Every structure is written in C-alpha cells, then in structure tokens.
Image (tube, rainbow, N blue to C red):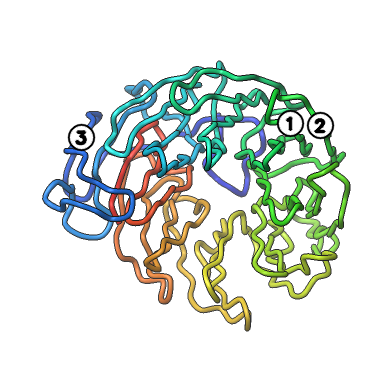
Amino acid sequence: MRAGSAVSAVRTSRSVALLGTLLFGTISLGGCSVHGPNTYGWFGDTNNSTLAGTSGLRIRWTEQLTEELDSSYQPVEHAAAALDPRRDRIYVGSSGGDFYAFDSGGQRKFHYNPRSGIEAAPAIDPQWGDIYLASEDGVVHALRSRTGEVRWKESAPGPVRQSPVLTEDAVFAITESDEVVAFAREDGEILWTHRRDVDVELAIVGHSGLTLHEGVLYAGFTDGMVAALRVADGGVVWERPTQLDIEENNDAHTFYDADATPVVVDDIVYCASFAAGVYALDRSNGTVLWREPIKGVNGLTTAGRFLVLASADEGVITLDRNTRERLWGRPLTRGAPGQPVITGNGTVLVAESTGSLLALDLRSGRELSRIDSGHGFAAAPAVAGELGWILSNGGTLMAFHL
C-alpha cells in the first residue's frame, strides 16, 4: 500500500485509501465514459456546446482504464499522459499494467500489456512517432506508433517510475535505485550506466526524473546529490551535494531526497532538496547561485520570471526568478501537491493527492477552476494548447478543455 502522506511515505506501499463520489462540478458521471463529437482541434478549436461544466476546466470525455473497485481503497495512478499532436495521439498507462493509445476524441487506437505497472509517461519521437515506455519492473519497451507493435525490450537494473528521455541515438532512463541507463534506440543495447551508491535509512516516495539540455543530463538522487552527466558516456560533468546544507534535527528523521526533476533555463539549473530547499545552480559547473530554504519541495517549473514550486509542507509557492521574492503562496488542504504545469494562457495546473485538479492564476494564485475525481490525483496533467488530459487515482483518464 502506498501511503498518502508525501512526508512519511517510504518506498514500500503502492495504494492509498481515498473516499468520495466521482463529480465534475455539479454533474455526476459515476463510472461511465462520456464521449462527445470529435470537434476538438489540438490548439483550441472547440464547440463549447458539448463541454461539461460552465467555465474554467471543462470535461470533454472520460475513459476508465482500470477495473473499478467497489471499495474505498483505490489504486494511486502516477502516469502522466504523453501527447503526439502530429499524429493525433494520447498515450497513457496505468498501475494495472495496461498501456493505451487514444485519439483526441477519445477513440481507442491500440492497447499494449507490458506485464508490469506503469508510473510515468512514455517518451515519443516527434518525427517518427516511435514510443519508448518504461514499466515499473525496469523494462524499457520500444513500440511502433501506429500499432503498438514491440520493436525491442530491454531491462534496466531497477524499477523505472520516471519518463525516459531521447536523443537521436539513445534512450535514457533513471531507476528508483539511483542508476541512470543509456539504451541504443535501434535495438535496446545498453550503452552505459551511471550508478550512485546511496546509503540512507528512509526516503520519500518518488524520484527525480531526467532533464536533457545541450548534451547533458541533469538529475537529483535519493541522498540529495544533484548531478550533471554527459550523454555520450555517462561521465560526471559536476555534482552538487545539497545534503551539506541541511541542519540536522535530532528529534526527527531527515529526508535528504532531491526528488524534483531539475529545470534548465538559459545558464541556470533549478532544483530542490526536500530538506535543504530550492537551488539555482550554474549550469556549467554546479556552483550555487542562490538557495531558498523552502522545505518539502518535490516539483517545480518555470515560465518567464515565475518559478512555481510544489511543496508538501506549504502547498504551491511562486517566486520571482530574478529577485527571489515570494509572489504568492497557496496552502493545500486535500493532500500533497503534484508536479505543477503552466499553460500557455498563464494558468498553473496543480493536482491534490486526495482532492482536485486546480487551475490557478499564475500572477496572483487566485483559483480559477477545479475538477474533482472523487479519488484525487497523483499524476501530472498534460496540456497542448487549450486541451488537457489527466489520469485520476482509481484509473479514470479525463480529457478537459481549459
């Protein structure tokens, strides 16, 4: 069973007790699927008469991906959707071990069973549409875009619960056991591995993903190390030990995790340690440009001058990247916040683990809208233009309009 608290959870349990009725605004949809005419373009071509709701986030259609349980115990779903607008495809997997391709109108195109749970979005080749899916058992699956046919499968040395990243020749994955693996895109051959030996007593559920920028991979590790690795051979460009900035507390266990996936903007790497706070690092050498001791940060993103943080302790916080001024904060009362996503119209989408998907104004933090699933959300939303998709706990894929 996976605990609902982001602070006390360790890497053992995989489910959570959640309660509620499946409601979207004032419209009860129960466990059914709702499909309207496929009149939606990928960048906001809509027919508002078919949208559920009256303003803000509006449901377009839903699809149940997992078996519905007649119980207050529902599976926690971490897999975000991956979007391929060029081919009108949405790809999403579930903890039950099913992987689906839909078009933007909700029509299923294919189903694939990787024989293990899926906790992350696949990587999609933007030119050819090839799919690279990592499953929880550590296997990376290379699939063809039109049919889901398997090209190759290869195992990483540990569970993979973060999305792979691609270069022209390689696929990169990071495991829960703090190992980065490079696979050849042609046949899955392992090109190199980089393992960080970590010795910590307890850790927060989750792990940093990989960020690729100009031939370098950036990642955080369970012991608080943030590292930059060369894509060519996995060699270390630099390492930054955030655990050195933690003030030890003898009355409570210290979580060293650097679980937020780094974000690179220009010559700065933004990253976070659960206990030491938020960092801006020099991209070339890892030098600390500044640090803000905001605790519990497990997700971050940027847009212009805004740095948006998801903190298990404080909720959603926005800083000015240039001045480090705190622009606004919003505590969350229904579980921990997920990875924030900023849309093109200046909206912050952030999910509550036992509550709603919230739409907040980027400049003020004011709530604009919300969607309830009845079971909360652990997955991040995926957005293209004015359309979005999110998988709820309990396994309902929701397509919405912004």
From the image, state whether disc 3 or disc 1 is nearer to you. Answer: 1
Identify whether 386 is placed above or below 305.
above
Indicate left or right for 283 with 260 as reference: right
From the image, state whether disc 2 or disc 3 is nearer to you. Answer: 2
- In the picture of the structure, the residue carrying the numbered disc 3 is 35
The image shows residue 321 at horizontal and vertical percentages of: 61, 76
- In the picture of the structure, the residue carrying the numbered disc 2 is 191
Disc 2 element: strand
Q: Residues within 10 Å of mark 1 (few under 14, many from 20)?
A: many
- In the picture of the structure, the residue carrying the numbered disc 1 is 183
Quadrant holding the N terminus: top right
Q: Residues within 10 Å of mark 2 (few under 14, many from 20)?
A: some
Residues at marks 2 and 1, CA–CA distance in whole angstroms:
6 Å
Residue type (three-letter) at the residue carrying disc 3: His
Residue type (three-letter) at the residue carrying disc 1: Phe
Which mark sits nearer the N-terminus, 2 or 3? 3
Residues at marks 3 and 1, CA–CA distance in whole angstroms:
39 Å
Which mark sits nearer the N-terminus, 3 or 1? 3
The image shows residue 338 at horizontal and vertical percentages of: 51, 51
Task: Tell me whether circle 2 and circle 1 mark residues in contact (CB < 8 Å).
Answer: yes
Disc 1 element: strand
Q: Residue at x 35, y 22 (%)?
A: 69
Indicate left or right for 353 with 191 as reference: left
Q: Residue at x 57, y 59 (%)?
A: 311
Name the foreground residue: 250 vs 317: 317
